[in-house]
Image (cartoon, helix red, strand yellow):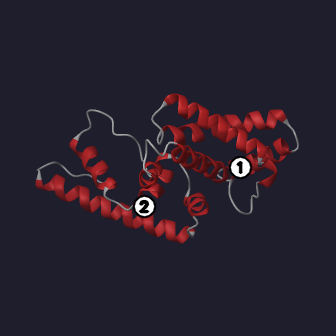
Amino acid sequence: MLFAWPHASVRLVRRAADGDARAFRALYRELHPVVHGYVARRIADGADVEDLVAKVFHRVLEHLERFDPAKASVRGWVVGITRNAVIDHLRTRRELVALDDAAELLAVVDPTPVGLDRRTEAVLAAVRELPVVTREMLALHFGDGLHYREIAELTGATEAAVKQRMARALRELRTRVAEPLASKGAAVHAV
């Protein structure tokens, strides 16, 4: 069952590329939550989020014939288009966000909600200290639901490098979070 979804998505892309509007609507329904979630975690303004989501699906529609399942999964390909749209959006807003900060925004795991417990605050603080590339990989995996292979396709790293970086980051987070909490007397459970 794990491999049925990617193959079904490839078929939808092929049918949509051939002009099947129902296939594109089905593809849209499958991918809208992924695209919307990715954009919403990185762009604060709700109207901008909706505009970007629409632009992404317009680009997807324009480039359906370019999709190559040998190079990327459908979800990875669409997240790549989404990532580029967010970068383009941030570049046009240069007066609001420095381009150096754009990399920071792409690496957002999720905005910090109000009323977090000490453990969650410690995890978020430790995540913020990780390198931007590692934070983006964590965001892509845990925030956007991408698999290691899809992250590798998107970032240009090998799948092995992504796995290694993620494992190292999780070990580091466990250490960083466990030490401060233990010194404060809090019960420490697996991170």
Local packing at callout 1 (Cα closer than 10 Å; few below 14, some 14-19, many 20+) is few
Residue placed under numbered mark 2 in the picture = 134
Which residue sits at x=71%, y=62%? Answer: 71
Which residue sits at x=15%, y=48%? Answer: 186
Question: Of callouts 1 and 2, which one flags the residue occurring earlier in the amino acid sequence?
Answer: 1
- Element class at badge 2: helix
Q: Where is residue 8 in the image (x, y as percent from the top left)?
A: 75, 46
- Residues 91 and 60: in front is 91
Q: Which amino acid does label 1 sit on?
A: Ala
Q: Which of marks 1 and 2 is in front?
A: 2
Q: Where is residue 108 in the image (x, y as percent from the top left)?
A: 42, 48
- Residues 103 and 111: in front is 103
Q: Where is residue 181 in the image (x, y as percent from the top left)?
A: 17, 52
Which residue sits at x=58%, y=47%? Answer: 88
Q: Which residue lies furthest to the front in this view?
A: 95
- Element class at badge 1: helix
Q: Where is residue 104 in the image (x, y as percent from the top left)?
A: 42, 52
Q: What residue type is labelled 2?
A: Thr
Total marks in image = 2
The numbered mark at residue 183 is: none
In the picture provided, is 188 more to the left or to the right than 100? left
In the picture provided, is 123 more to the left or to the right than 150? left
Image position of 112 with respect to 176: above or below: above
- Residues 94 and 14: in front is 94
Residue placed under numbered mark 1 in the picture = 4
Q: In which quarter of the image is residue 48?
A: top right
In the picture provided, is 1 more to the left or to the right than 157? right
Local packing at callout 2 (Cα closer than 10 Å; few below 14, some 14-19, many 20+) is some
Distance between the alpha carbons at the discs numbered 1 and 2? 29 Å
